[in-house]
Image: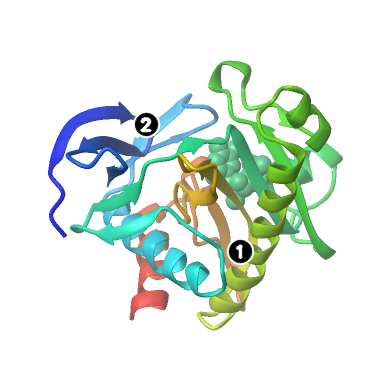
Amino acid sequence: MSVKKLTQLYEGKAKKVYETDDPELLIVDYKDDATAFNGEKKGTITGKGVINNRMTNYFMRELEKIGVPTHLVEELSERETVVKRVKIVPLEVIVRNITAGSFAKRYGVEEGIPFDAPAHEFSYKDDALGDPMINDSYAVALKLATAEEIALIKKYAFAINAKLRELLLGFGVTLVDFKVEFGKLADGTIILADEISPDTCRFWDSKTGEKLDKDRFRRDLGNVEGAYEEMARRIFG
Ligand code: TMP
């Protein structure tokens, strides 16, 4: 495939997005930049972009096999991937299996308590508002998506959770929680967009409980690069 990288469309916290000579395709370029707490904390995680690009694409290929459509078209280079152009549904879809992070804080519980069943949460994707938590009917009221689209997004999110858990178990990693985003193609099809990586998931070593994700950066736990490298080693050898 030969798509030409044209002008930069957008620079996000962790990725740059470029237009291509095909109006339906974009190129994402994964950076080593890391932020936390809505951009308040900034840093660099050397090598992260390369790992997140490869890992995201690996997970997306596996998800396509179980019927979850994704924006993945082709990995172009270590940091660049061709993806389908979508209109992002402004919802951050979080699925949790174990108490951690903002759930533990909000509800005053310890981290590490397994749920009886996976649970989901939506945030309204709006940095200026601080990505406030939102429910299904408010998302419909704000016309962020239709009720049918939200039902499909939830179905996909739980299917993604089940598949990722199964894959990660094989690598000795427990999937605590994760965040995904979906987009809409011009014909209205909902597909998984954005990334699936240690930036957007909580990965704990199944035996030791060691954190192998961005919480090492968020919480200044040290060995941040080592955690990303360890995840890459487990998956890709
Ligand atoms: P939380 O416990 O802080 O709400 O995070 C839940 C999951 O979502 C966790 O795996 C990290 C991921 N996440 C993002 O991908 N982006 C974000 O901006 C935040 C706050 C969390």
Q: Is residue 165 above or below residue 125?
A: below
In which quadrant of the rendered view does residue 75 lie?
A: bottom left
- Judged from the image, the quadrant occupied by ligand 1 is top right
Front of the two marks 1 and 2 = 1
Q: Quick one: which residue is furthest to the top in this view?
A: 128
Residue at disc 2, secondary structure: loop
Which residue in the protein does label 1 denote? 160
Front residue (pair 142, 168):
142
Corner quadrant of residue 32 = top left
- Quarter of the image for the N terminus: give it: bottom left
Q: Amino acid at mark 2?
A: Gly
Could you say whether the residue bearing mark 1 is in a helix, strand or loop? helix
User: How are the residues colored?
Assistant: rainbow
Mark 1 CB lies closer than 8 A to ligand 1? no
Q: Position of residue 48 (x, y in %)?
A: 32, 52
As rendered, which of 187 and 236 lies closer to the eye? 187
Measured in 3D between alpha carbons, the distance from the residue under mark 1 to the one under mark 2, in whole angstroms, is 24 Å
Q: Position of residue 178 (x, y in %)?
A: 60, 53
Disc number for residue 12? 2
Rate crowding at label 1 as few (under 14), some (14 to 19) or many (20 or more) other CA atoms within 10 Å.
Answer: many
Task: Check mark 2 vs ligand 1: CB closer than 8 Å? yes or no.
Answer: no
Front-most of residues 153 and 45: 153
| Residue at (27% x, 60% y) in the render | 74
Q: Residue at x 85, y 41 (%)?
A: 107
